[in-house]
Amino acid sequence: MILRPWGHVDWLLGKLGDVPWSLLACCGSETRSIALAQHLGRHRLRSAEIVAIHDAEPLNPHAHKKRLLARRDSLLKCGYRENEIRDVELLAGLDDKVEPLQRLIAGGSTRLIIDVTSFPKVWFFPIIQTVLDSNHFEDVVVTYTSAVTYSDNLSENLAPLRALPGFFAEDGRSKHDSIIVGIGFEPLGLIPLLKNQESNKIKLIFPFPPGPPGHLRNWMFVQQIEELTQNEQIDAPDRVHIDMYDCPQIFDALCKMTNDGDDTAAIAPYGPKTVSLAMCLFALSVAAVGKSRVPIYYAQPHRYALDYTSGVRMRGNVPEITGYCLRLGNRDLYTLPS
């Protein structure tokens, strides 16, 4: 059994020694996007790369730009440097996505924290893949900051549904033993996926407990899937309820659903980033042992709500930031038997 440590970031980093970490993070319009960077402070880090991602088609360009500038000012007040905060485009190519990693590597970083809180999935999936495919970082931790509330309308103006960069079926298959869906608030592009990717088994990962009013939106998401399966004469979906923060348990559930990757699957990473992280790690672990790759499909929005979330959830006076060890001492912790 592999121990995969996770918990509050202060507890986790406190167990991992005093050697300074490098930080890769995303500065967005949300307050929580810079909560980890503020909580750690620049003085505790060896180096930092923070990308300010600009939406492809912001609803209010002036307000979006103003919000990003305010976040930048907050980071500068915490000691971060101008050349550590860089503007990038949401739909940038793969080279632009991994360029911050290359700068950290060139600076001699060996311990990396990746804060996925506000990274779009089209960014953080290839970032995680690039990091774990390399041997430059001996220790890798991913962090996620919880918000207080979510916007009613999270995003809009979707790109066509497609596999995320680096997460495709090498044989181009469209028939799978199962399709695994993370339950979220908005099933963006999900209906085309279930119609175009053939499978008689739909498996749902339901983040539990979401808490009101989130549970109502989750159940509406499930209802849409159940109605679609009835209309398409697909077997009723199986549903697994899992703690949304327990990335190791979600990873193990994915292994069980697919017989450790022996059964083919396609994945739709809706819902919390913590569930998406487990899905990303599962797909990478399947590819690493030479089994049939797991395609991950997503319809990338071109526009996010300016207030996608509000506030930072607190534990007393401490922000609720959860950390997950992906690699310790050059040993990857999320793997399948070879």
Image (spheres, grey):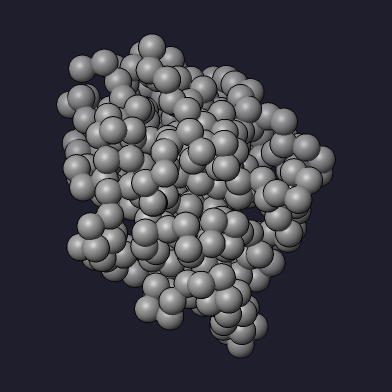
Instruction: Look at the picture and state if 139 lies above or below 25.
Output: above
Left or right: residue 199 compared with residue 152: left
Q: Point out residue 134 in the picture as x, y percentages from the top left corner.
A: 20, 45
- The quadrant in which residue 296 appears is top left
Nearest the viewer among 46 and 283 is 46
| Residue at (19, 36) in percent of width and height | 171
Q: Quadrant of the N terminus?
A: top left
| Residue at (48, 63) in percent of width and height | 43
Instruction: Look at the picture and state if 217 lies above or below 310.
Output: above
Q: Residue furthest front?
A: 18
Q: Quadrant of the C terminus?
A: top left
Q: Point out residue 14 in the picture as x, y percentages from the top left corner.
A: 51, 38
Nearest the viewer among 50 and 262 is 50
How many marks can you see?
A: 0
| Residue at (66, 64) in percent of width and height | 31
Left or right: residue 308 compared with residue 249: right
Left or right: residue 268 compared with residue 39: left
Q: Residue furthest bottom?
A: 62
- The quadrant in which residue 227 appears is top right
